[in-house]
Amino acid sequence: MPALTRERPAGILAVIAGVLLIGLAQRIAPLAEPPLYDGVYVPQPYVWLVPPAGAKGGAKGAKGSVGVEGGANKLVAVATPEQDPQAQILATSGALVLPAGSTSVDFSIEPVLPERLPAAGHIDGNVYRIKVTNQAGTPLTALASALVTIVMVSPHTDPDRTIELDTGAGWQPLKTQNQGPGVWLAVVTEFGEFAVVAPGPATVAYPTATPAGGVVVSSAPSGAAGSGALEPSPSEDVPSIGVVGGPSSAPSAAPSSSGSSGGSLPVAPIALVVALAALALIAVLWSRGRRKPPPPSSYRGAHRR
């Protein structure tokens, strides 16, 4: 028991020092939220406007508006509400060409039935109509140097897809970059109906709109499971995601040169762990150095009288 009593102050000292070190680390590099558990990513099922048999329906859109300051638009950053947004538009401050008298910019993303199909290939996923106008409803364009970006997701991950744009005169392919499995990016200067297009003929019927508002089944994404009941799901506008008003938090609209991005290691937590380990080692060594050897035994053995 005396040995344990002597070691107790060392343990208490180590605990107090550790708590103080944690407080110091939090003061120097505070964590705004709990650490992220980097687990296994599970892709979410694609949400269709007109779902094939066995697929998920109910695709929704998004809309919003931003102000104009000094003749330049504020940041535009909007995405559809799925956990993995299926369509996004990103435009930095001043990226849009604004007519004189513009006071705000309105934008929307809406899943729609296309009026026509691409001349080559087939649509893989939903068609999204992206509109960007000023407060008077005048369609806006973007500077090529501004790198206004459209990001779209397709239900299949084959690496041979292309984003195409239909402004009313037929589908035109855009220079497209693959940003990961089933994620595609293109820089645009005008807006209209966008879709991810795959090469080759379709294997399942895909619906198109008619001028009278009807539905014509014509072609569809390959790999879909059966034609199913092709009834359009209602589109619903929802509050835009990530719409902010200043350039300080603007996302980079420039295309990435690789399909994935990496981040730096969190310095403060690593330094904290190393410091705590070093402190614990010092405390153990210090407590061992303070141990006193047991007193020599006074037993001299048996003596015969």
Image: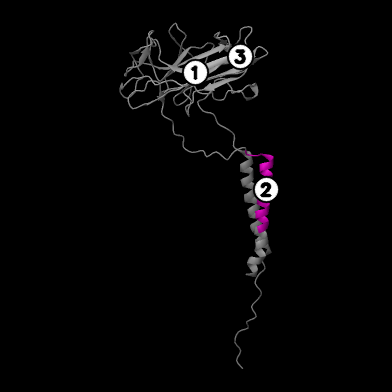
Total numbered badges shown on the rendered structure: 3
Judged by depth in the image, the label closer to the viewer, 1 or 3, is: 3
- Looking at the rendered structure, the secondary structure element under dot 1 is strand
Q: Nearer the viewer, residue 168 or 209?
A: 209
Residue 156 picture quarter: top left
Sort mark 1 into few (<14), some (14-19) or many (20+) by Cα contacts within 10 Å. Answer: many
Q: Is residue 289 above or below residue 261?
A: below
The residue shown at (63%, 49%) is 276
Residue type at the position of mark 3: Ser
- Dots 3, 2 in contact, CB < 8 A: no
Residue 253 picture quarter: top right
In the rendered image, residue 303, in percent from the top left (x then y), is placed at: 61, 89
**Mark earlier in primary sequence (1, 3):** 3
Q: Residue 21 — which label?
A: 2
Q: What stretch of residues is rendered in magenta?
A: 12-31
Residue type at the position of mark 1: Ile
Q: Residue 109 — which label?
A: 1
Q: Nearer the viewer, residue 134 or 246?
A: 134
The colour mode here is: one colour
Q: Work out whether residue 22 can be spotted.
A: yes
- Dots 1, 3 in contact, CB < 8 A: no
Residue 48 picture quarter: top left
Judged by depth in the image, the label closer to the viewer, 1 or 2, is: 1
Sort mark 2 into few (<14), some (14-19) or many (20+) by Cα contacts within 10 Å. Answer: some
Residue type at the position of mark 2: Leu
